[in-house]
Amino acid sequence: MIIKKSITFEGVSQMQLETRRHVRYKVKDGTLAALSVPGKLKLTIGPVLDISKGGLALMHTDEISAEPEKAELVLLGHDESKTSELRFPARFIYRQKLQKGYRSGFEFKNLSGDQISLLASFIESNSSSAISVEPVLH
């Protein structure tokens, strides 16, 4: 599916073509992700901006030193008492510099059947609404 949509980041509007296989969801406040890259001692932690069965967008203040092909995302739900931390293999897709940090996108990679089920439950428990991906007609 190819969708033309208008996006705005910190007041800057731009048009982009986007291809998605999965519906994206906004997450509830307090939903976090930690990025762990093999061979690096540093963790990058920040709020999850949106999530789908295919990946997520993460807001963070520290620059990711390398574009990791192999990384692990640790997801923490908005209500830590109800969910344990979940670990998923991921691949870095993009990084966008913002005024107050970075927005980075990650794709989940090679998930097992159990991981797919856990991810679906995590999304159901921690999402607030689906993000509309309706085409913009001009």
Image (cartoon, rainbow, N blue to C red):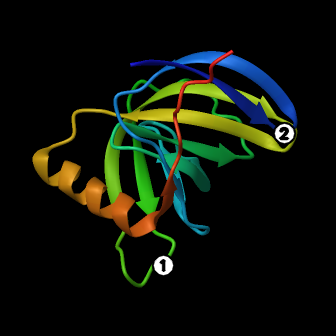
Q: Residue at x 69, y 26 (%)?
A: 6
Label 2 sits on what residue type?
Glu
Dot 1 crowding, Cα within 10 Å, few <14, some 14–19, many 20+: some
Q: Secondary structure at mark 2?
A: loop
The residue depicted at 37 percent of the width and 81 percent of the height is 82
* Callout in the foreground (2, 1): 2
- How far apart, in angstroms, are the residues tagged by discs 2 and 1? 28 Å
Reading the image, the residue beneath label 1 is 79
From the viewer's side, name the closer residue of 134 and 74. 134
Disc 1, SS: loop
Query: Where residue 80 sits in the image (x, y, percent)?
Result: 45, 78
Dots 2, 1 in contact, CB < 8 A? no
Query: Which quadrant is home to the N terminus?
Result: top left
| Labelled disc at residue 10 | 2
Q: Earlier in the sequence, mark 2 or mark 1?
A: 2
In front here: 66 or 6?
6
The quadrant holding residue 14 is: top right
Label 2 crowd bin: few (<14), some (14–19), many (20+), radius 10 Å: few
> In the image, is 134 to the left or to the right of 12?
left
| Residue 111 pos. (x, y %) | 21, 40
Q: Is residue 72 left or right of residue 50?
A: left
* Quadrant of the drawing holding the C terminus: top right
